Image (cartoon, rainbow, N blue to C red):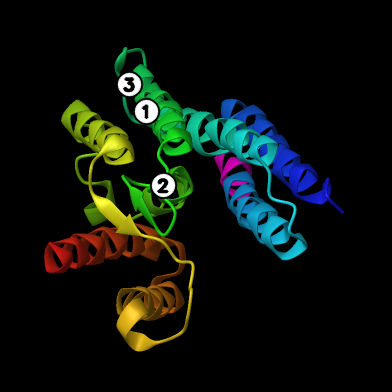
């Protein structure tokens, strides 16, 4: 039983590896599924470790190594492929790898920062990866509004730099672990979960950027109220 969380973490890493293979092959929808499955496994390994009482430093380090691949490199490759579609034969697609560089930096900082238990500093790598995973579906829709400006290098540079910055920013984002179920201690979590569920029911995958934006805005509001 004590090895089960680490096996789940290795499953997360394997999903990242498969996703990278499919992303480079142009099968972005399969790569996206691997990010989603990796996110489920990433949640599951910690849950199993806590329930079984077998949390360890090894598991923490292994989790970060898996996350660099599944939520750092894989999203970067997806972003690289997307940018390559709109800006072929240029150097612009390589900017996508800022995401994996800053993901690695973010995870190293996280492992050394003992304050990041009930809240995070900067965007968690799984949330950033889930946001990027929504792009192939959203940008693949035949909507002129959604496609407006995608061929512009400015759009992709700003988007990629913003995502990389959010990973290591000082913005304090609340975690989703409940110590109790009272409203006072969890009002931002309840508001976020309610808005997220409604948005996902109404807009499905298209709602993911909205969910991430709501998460950021609520966290900033919470930080302002606590300051």
Tell me the quarter of the picture where residue 18 sits.
Answer: top right
The reply to whether residue 19 is visible in this rendering is no
Label whose residue precedes the other's in the sequence (1 or 2):
1
Q: Position of residue 92 (x, y in %)?
A: 30, 19
The answer to whether residue 98 is above or below residue 61 is above
Which residue is under mark 2? 124
Q: CA distance from mark 1 to mark 2?
A: 11 Å
Q: Residue 86 vs residue 78: left or right?
A: left
> Few, some or many C-alpha atoms within 10 Å of disc 2 (few <14, some 14-19, many ≥20)?
many
Q: Is residue 41 magenta?
A: no
> Upstream in the sequence, badge 1 or badge 3?
3
Question: Quadrant of residue 13 in the image?
Answer: top right
Q: Is residue 14 above or below residue 222?
A: above
Q: Nearer the viewer, mark 1 or mark 3?
A: 1
User: Looking at the figure, which quarter contains the C terminus?
Assistant: bottom left
Label 1 sits on residue: 102
Label 3: element kind: helix
State the mark number for residue 65.
none
Residue 180 location, x and y as percent? 47, 80
Q: Are marks 1 and 2 in contact (CB under 8 Å)?
A: no
Q: How far is the residue under mark 1 from the one under mark 3?
A: 12 Å
Q: Regarding mark 1 in the picture, which secondary structure is present there?
A: helix
Few, some or many residues within 10 Å of mark 3 (<14, 14–19, 20+): some
Quadrant, the N terminus? bottom right
Viewer-proximal residue, 204 or 227?
227
- The segment highlighted magenta reads 27-33
> Which is more N-terminal, label 3 or label 2?
3
Q: Nearer the viewer, residue 119 or 17?
A: 119
Q: Residue at x 43, y 72 (%)?
A: 200
Is most of the magenta stretch helix, strand or loop?
helix
């Amino acid at each position: 039983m004590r090895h089960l969380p680490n096996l789940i973490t290795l499953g997360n890493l394997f999903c990242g590896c498969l996703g990278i293979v499919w992303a480079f092959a142009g099968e972005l929808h399969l790569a996206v599924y691997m990010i989603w499955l990796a996110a489920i496994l990433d949640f599951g390994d910690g849950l199993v470790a806590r329930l079984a009482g077998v949390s360890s430093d090894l598991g923490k380090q292994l989790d970060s190594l898996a996350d660099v691949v599944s939520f750092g490199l894989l999203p970067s490759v997806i972003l690289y492929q997307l940018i390559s579609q709109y800006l072929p034969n240029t150097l612009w697609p390589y900017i996508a790898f800022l995401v994996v560089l800053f993901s690695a930096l973010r995870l190293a900082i996280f492992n050394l920062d003992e304050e990041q238990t009930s809240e995070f500093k900067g965007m968690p790598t799984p949330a950033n990866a889930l946001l990027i995973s929504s792009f192939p579906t959203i940008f693949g829709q035949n909507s002129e509004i959604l496609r407006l400006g995608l061929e512009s290098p400015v759009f992709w540079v700003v988007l990629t730099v913003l995502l990389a910055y959010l990973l290591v920013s000082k913005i304090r984002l609340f975690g989703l672990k409940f110590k109790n179920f009272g409203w006072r201690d969890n009002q931002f979590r309840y508001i976020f979960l309610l808005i997220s569920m409604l948005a996902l029911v109404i807009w499905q995958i298209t709602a993911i950027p909205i969910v991430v934006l709501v998460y950021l805005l609520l966290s900033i509001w919470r930080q302002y109220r606590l300051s």
